[in-house]
Amino acid sequence: MKLSREEVVHIAALARMSMSEAEIEKAREQLAVILENFEILKEVDTTNVPPTAQSINLQSVMREDIPGESLPAEKVLANAPDREGDLFKLRPVLE
């Protein structure tokens, strides 16, 4: 599918890109090849292919969350700059 110079200039304007004449011509050729590839893809029979948002099955890469024993409060608060009882003491964020 051939694109005109004006179509490429219009596309560049929509993308807020400024292009030299050489860049317009190069983009025209490259966009034409991309559009030709889409025309080829239109010929593929997809009648028995269910619609999907992913081309591969997704699986979680995170490990299962297994509860365990917590650290004792004294160990957790050992390096706290300031504390009040078993709590971290911080400056107020909102007054």
Image: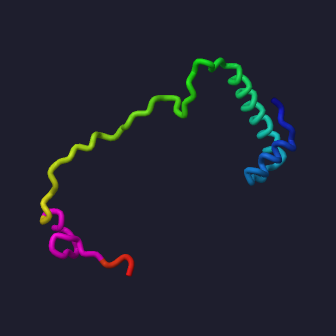
Relative to 65, does residue 86 appear above or below in the rendering? below
Q: Is residue 21 left or right of residue 80?
A: right
| Tag count | 0
Q: Is residue 63 magenta?
A: no
Q: Is residue 84 left or right of residue 25?
A: left
Identify which residue is drawn at 77% across, 48% down: 12
Q: What span is in magenta?
A: 75-90
Q: Nearer the viewer, residue 52 or 73?
A: 52
Identify which residue is drawn at 78% across, 44% down: 23
Relative to 36, does residue 76 appear above or below in the rendering? below
Q: Is residue 77 magenta?
A: yes
Q: Is residue 32 left or right of residue 44?
A: right
Residue 89 quadrant: bottom left
Q: Nearer the viewer, residue 7 or 49?
A: 49
Identify which residue is drawn at 80% across, 38% down: 28
Q: Where in the figure is residue 58, as x and y percent of width and height?
A: 44, 33
Identify which residue is drawn at 14% across, 51% down: 69
Residue 76 quadrant: bottom left
Q: Nearer the viewer, residue 25 or 31?
A: 31
Q: Is residue 81 left or right of residue 17?
A: left
Q: Where in the figure is residue 22, as x and y percent of width and height?
A: 82, 44
Relative to 12, does residue 45 appear above or below in the rendering? above
